[in-house]
Image: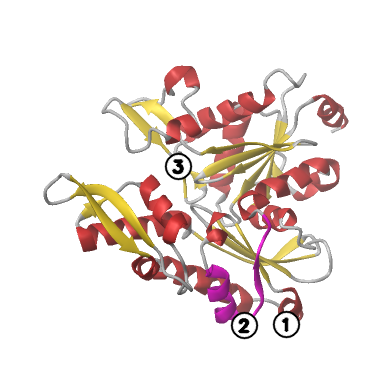
Amino acid sequence: MILDTILGWFSLDMGIDLGTCNTLVCVRGDGIVLNEPSVVAVKKGTNRVLQDGNAVGVVAKDMLGKTPGSISAIRPLKDGVISDFEITEAMLSYFIRKVHGRRGLVSPRVVISVPSGITAVEKRAVLDSAERAGARKVYLVQEPMAAGIGAGLPITEPTASMIVDIGGGTTEVAIMSLADISVRESVRVAGDDMDEAIINHLKRTYNLLIGESRSEKIKITIGSAAPLDKELTMEISGRDTISGLPRKIVITSEEIRECLKEPISQIVDTVTRTLERAEPELAADLIDNGICLAGGGALLRRLDKVLSNATGLDVRVADDPLTCVARGTSVYLENLELWKDTLESDDTNL
């Protein structure tokens, strides 16, 4: 333990928000230094990463849906957990190497955020992937804790703090107090499900087939959870499923809102279930403290209004919600000696 502390003085320790859609890396003292898509391009039928192992992140995302038959652009995480071990290891290795370079004398210690609802086997997969990718020591922190710290919530105080972290693969809902989670719910419904709902709507209603990237763009541009003061329209192109030819249509924010109802209602149900399980004193605190939204899903227009109407509580969106978890891992890095006994690692019985 003393040796680990001494080595920590010379290593470029980093915190990683290993997300289904994006991976963010922060370095102790420097904040967030990398923000890239969690995508890897490989030669089809193998796990060999293209371009000498550099077809990762932004480069690989640009290939999604556009690759020839010999290449596959893969997202190795699904629902917030590893679905392809080898490719996740290659992706982590690339990100760690890109950030670490030759600036550190020894391999880094790494704090990685993971969904609160993952299994021991899934945790082991994250630990092993990071260690094989070049980390000296790996610590796991639950996403709601990291998101709460990154959002500036007083999670160490004897009062209730509630976070709703809507990522790409999972929605994490937790009520925290005294530096621990009192009640939590983790549901594998989030931004990816919204994108899938839009794809299915266009295919069913217009016989138009679009890809994930275009669907995400629609969600960001005109998506909403409740009626807007001024409804929006958007021109979208895709492939006609009947003729097989490219086609262009105009869609409205009203129809996109309608197709997003199902995933949004599941998220609302998860929030209300969490509140129903809260201790009375913690529930009372939330009347004053309200709910904080984090993650990319928090940026969906009027989602805060929908959650406020469903719960009767004040709901606010965190500053820069996309980076809350990464900023939280950065705080853990800054205070690693103080916090590491509360984190899971190889020394913990998973």
Q: Are marks 2 and 1 in contact (CB under 8 Å)?
A: no
**Which residue is nearer to you in this view: 238 or 277?**
238
Q: Earlier in the sequence, mark 1 or mark 3?
A: 3
Q: Are marks 1 and 3 in contact (CB under 8 Å)?
A: no
Measure the alpha-carbon separation of dots 1 and 3.
Answer: 39 Å
Residue 256, given in percent of the width and then of the height, sits at 37, 65
Measure the alpha-carbon separation of dots 3 and 2.
Answer: 38 Å
Residue 254, given in percent of the width and then of the height, sits at 37, 70
Task: Inspect the magenta stretch and tell me whether residue 62 lies in it.
Answer: no
Q: Which mark is residue 280?
A: 1
Q: Residues within 10 Å of mark 2 (few under 14, many from 20)?
A: few
| Badge 1 element | helix
**Which residue is nearer to you in this view: 254 or 56?**
254
| Farthest-out residue, left | 243
In-image side of 202 versus 24 (left or right) = left
Residue at point 47%, 73% (across, down):
226
Task: Inspect the magenta stretch and tell me whether residue 305 lies in it.
Answer: yes
Identity of the amino acid at label 1?
Answer: Pro
Residue 211, given in percent of the width and then of the height, sits at 32, 46
Which contiguous range is marked in magenta?
Answer: 302-319
Q: Which residue is mark 3?
A: 83
- Residue 294 higher or lower than 14, as above or below: below
